[in-house]
Amino acid sequence: MEALFIVAGLVGFLVAWLWLVASSLRMGSRAVLLAVLLPLVTPFLRETDFPRLPRLLILLSLLCLGGGLFLLQQQQPERFQRLLSGQWQDAAPQGELQGTLMGQPFAPDRVYWRGDQLVFAETVGERTRRSLVVRFDRAQTLLQGTAIDLIPGDDGPWPEMVIQWYTGALSAPGLRRIAAGYSLSLSLSPQGNGSADMVVHLHLPAEHRTWLGGRVRLNERPAWLGRTRQSNQIPPPAPEPLPVPVTPQGWQEVSLLAVLDEPEHFVGQRLRLVTIAGREYEGVLKAVTTERRLVLSLPQGANQVDFQFQPLDIALIETQPRR
């Protein structure tokens, strides 16, 4: 609505201006210069030969233009500021996420994992203007490895898409949930300092007018990154041991402090970690960082993936004695 008022005001002013200039041609050079250079002054001149209708149209056009700008400032203050500064279009960020959400430009500036939910948020100050949340609460089996790919027609559980948007004080916020039928591709690669690079390609059905694509750096990698399907399976119950005293040859519990204080005795050994959340990881201890984090090398297909664990997240450490 505000755009219609602004366009109508500009068109009306242009028509009234041309009308005023054409009417002043028979009034002398002074009247022509006044109509060309100072058309906004003519509506306030009492004793003048300028026709009344074009001057009245100038006043109505100014009221229409001012009303449109007022509505724009109330409903979309960020666009009003760009209009005043001469930035007619949003600058598309290079190498970052960009797309549309419900037909509006969408460039999230905050991307993070909140538990099993992936959040894309576009903010203005402290306020969230638009957001898209991928909820894996009912599709946790997809959270493993380094990639997630879904296309319409795939079987199995689907994460739920929740999109929210807020257009201004005079419009109600919108909320929509999409359970399936979209295409989603997430590819993550671990980086140093606990971060990860993520490439996103998301296309919702056409009626939602929403898509998102690009690359983004996550300051904190998700906990599931690199998890294998075997680590989520419950091992079969071990047979009852014979009541014969034997030297323990399996897993032995060790002290976390011992590993942190004397890592040279454990580097290269196979360790089994159990986190506070109950997740189990098994691999070779590679190192203990200066931040006192345990670096565990886990098999990932034909490759090895290094994971870092903070001491506060570890509930149990077991090791296999060297032979």
Image (cartoon, rainbow, N blue to C red):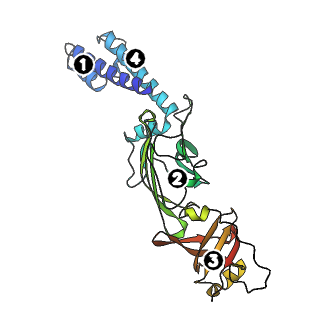
Query: Helix, strand or loop at disc 1?
Result: helix
Query: Helix, strand or loop at disc 2?
Result: strand
The span from disc 3 to disc 1 (Cα, nearest Å) is: 89 Å
Q: Is residue 250 above or below residue 62?
A: below
* Circle 1 residue: 21
Dot 1 or dot 4, earlier in sequence: 1
* Circle 3 residue: 271
The span from disc 1 to disc 4 (Cα, nearest Å) is: 18 Å
10 Å crowding of disc 4: few (<14), some (14-19), many (20+): some
Q: In this view, does 90 lie above or below 113?
A: above
10 Å crowding of disc 3: few (<14), some (14-19), many (20+): many
Query: Helix, strand or loop at disc 3?
Result: strand
10 Å crowding of disc 1: few (<14), some (14-19), many (20+): many
- Can residue 120 be spotted in the picture? yes
Identify residue type, mark 3.
Leu
* Circle 4 residue: 60
Q: Is residue 291 above or below residue 5?
A: below
* Circle 2 residue: 111
Identify residue type, mark 2.
Val
Dot 4 or dot 2, earlier in sequence: 4
Dot 2 or dot 3, earlier in sequence: 2
Q: Do the residues labelled 1 and 2 touch (CB within 8 Å)?
A: no
Q: Quadrant of the N terminus?
A: top left
The residue sitting at 36% across, 25% down in the picture is: 7
Residue 271: quarter of image: bottom right
Q: Is residue 191 left or right of residue 35?
A: right
The span from disc 1 to disc 2 (Cα, nearest Å) is: 56 Å
List x then y, in percent, for residue 123: 53, 45
Q: Do the residues labelled 3 and 1 touch (CB within 8 Å)?
A: no
The span from disc 3 to disc 4 (Cα, nearest Å) is: 80 Å
Dot 3 or dot 4, earlier in sequence: 4
Q: Which residue is nearer to you in this view: 119 or 106? A: 119
